[in-house]
Amino acid sequence: MNDNIIEINTLNLWYGENRALTDVSLPVRKNKITALIGPSGCGKSTLLRSINRMNDLILKCKIEGQIMYHGQNIYDPSIDVNSLRKRIGMIFQKPNPFPMSIRDNITYGPKIHGITDEKELDEIVERSLMQAALWNEVSDRLNQSALALSGGQQQRLCIARALSVSPEVILMDEPTSALDPLATSKIEDLACELEKEYTVIIVTHNMQQASRISDYTGFMYIGKMIEFGDTESIFNRPTENLTERYITGRFG
């Protein structure tokens, strides 16, 4: 039985004349955490943004190849991009809460998708904040500005906001790079909890983080997927010399 929720096949991407991805292929397992590692500028974030078509927003971006999601190429002209992004949510490097209340941050997405019943919205707010391990910290101040939260709380709020529309896949683009160690630990613990119900793909420059929380790891270099496999094998028994050099710090 195929347990891949996403299959990326020979993906190539250009920004104008600059080729950012070259023949990238990898499977993404359902209800697992997949980490993408590699040096800065190697194409990790570009690949991540391709999975929910965020690169559509970039001028002169050209894409070839396939990203199959439930057996359908997400770049097929028949795909509704808004529906796709509802099912494949995105968490960015820096927390980006909307300049509105905590509650309004969570209800924003459900309202766009047609939910107007206040009781149902209240249930979504509580469920999403509980899943993001934030409910106990903010339940008594839901009408206060989200911008008053700490950086780590803001990032968990952004995760709750993504969860509010019931996605299936969560993309995380270096979600802890702007956070302190304590907040980072909370996000890592949260990612491991989310794995029970969601599929998580995380871009990280922190190899220790990848080894701690991911089930599968892909090592990228200059736009290519050098090696992909289960995390334990990638970190302890890499098959490619380039992977071993990067993981052991003998890179460059």
Image: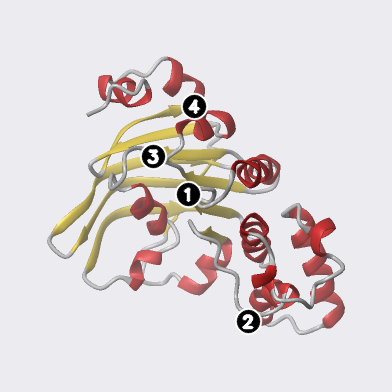
Q: Which residue is mark 2?
A: 112
Choose between 149 and 172: the one closer to the eye.
Answer: 149
Amino acid at the residue labelled 1: Glu
Instruction: State yes or no: discs 2 and 1 in contact (Cβ < 8 Å).
Output: no
Circle 1 crowding by C-alpha within 10 Å: few under 14, some 14–19, many from 20:
some
N-terminal label among 4 and 3: 3
Asked if 76 appears above or below 130 in the picture, the reply is below
Spatial CA span between label 3 and label 2 = 33 Å
Question: Crowding near pointer 2: few (<14 within 10 Å), some, many (20+)?
Answer: few
Residue type (three-letter) at the residue carrying disc 4: Thr
Closest to the camera, between mark 1 and mark 4, is: 1
Q: Earlier in the sequence, mark 1 or mark 3?
A: 3
Say which element carries label 3: strand
| Marks 4 and 2, the one that precedes in the sequence | 2
Tag 1 residue: 174
Distance from the alpha carbon under mark 4 to that under mark 3: 14 Å
**Residue at image coords 51%, 46%:** 201
Nearest-to-viewer mark from 4 and 3: 4
Assess whether mark 3 and mark 1 are in contact (beta carbons under 8 angstroms): no
Seen from the viewer's position, the closer of residues 125 and 216 is 125
Instruction: Find numbered disc 2 in the image and state the secondary structure of the residue it sits on.
Output: helix
Q: Are marks 3 and 2 in contact (CB under 8 Å)?
A: no
Q: Amino acid at mark 2?
A: Ile
